[in-house]
Image (cartoon, rainbow, N blue to C red):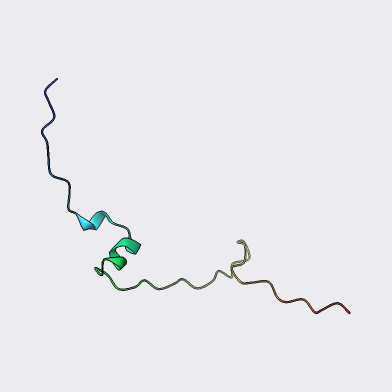
Amino acid sequence: MPEAVPRQPRRDDTAADAGSLERLGRIDPQPIPAPSISPFLEPDLPPAEEPAAE
């Protein structure tokens, strides 16, 4: 089997995730999604405060 040809590392930033590209200043900060209100998923909202027991 022939020897592998040495190559330079890729410098392709299109394979990066959005968080990395944001830290590098390549893209604008991404919006935070709204909380889920689907009845089929766990709620993202904090539980309502219960009245204090006396």
Q: Position of residue 17 (x, y in %)?
A: 32, 58
Task: Decide: is 33 above or below 7.
Answer: below
Q: Position of residue 5 (x, y in %)?
A: 10, 33
Asked which quadrant contains residue 51, the reply is: bottom right
Asked which quadrant contains residue 15, the reply is: bottom left
The answer to whether residue 3 is left or right of residue 30 is left
Foreground pick, 31 / 20: 20
Foreground pick, 15 / 10: 10
Outermost residue, top side: 1
| Residue in the image at 62% along x and 67% along y | 43
The answer to whether residue 17 is left or right of residue 48 is left
Quarter containing the N terminus: top left
Outermost residue, right side: 54
Quarter containing the C terminus: bottom right
| Residue in the image at 59% along x and 70% along y | 37
The answer to whether residue 38 is left or right of residue 16 is right
| Residue in the image at 68% along x and 71% along y | 47
Task: Decide: is 24 above or below 5.
Answer: below
| Residue in the image at 61% along x and 72% along y | 45
Q: Position of residue 36 (x, y in %)?
A: 55, 69
Foreground pick, 7 / 37: 7
The answer to whether residue 2 is left or right of residue 46 is left
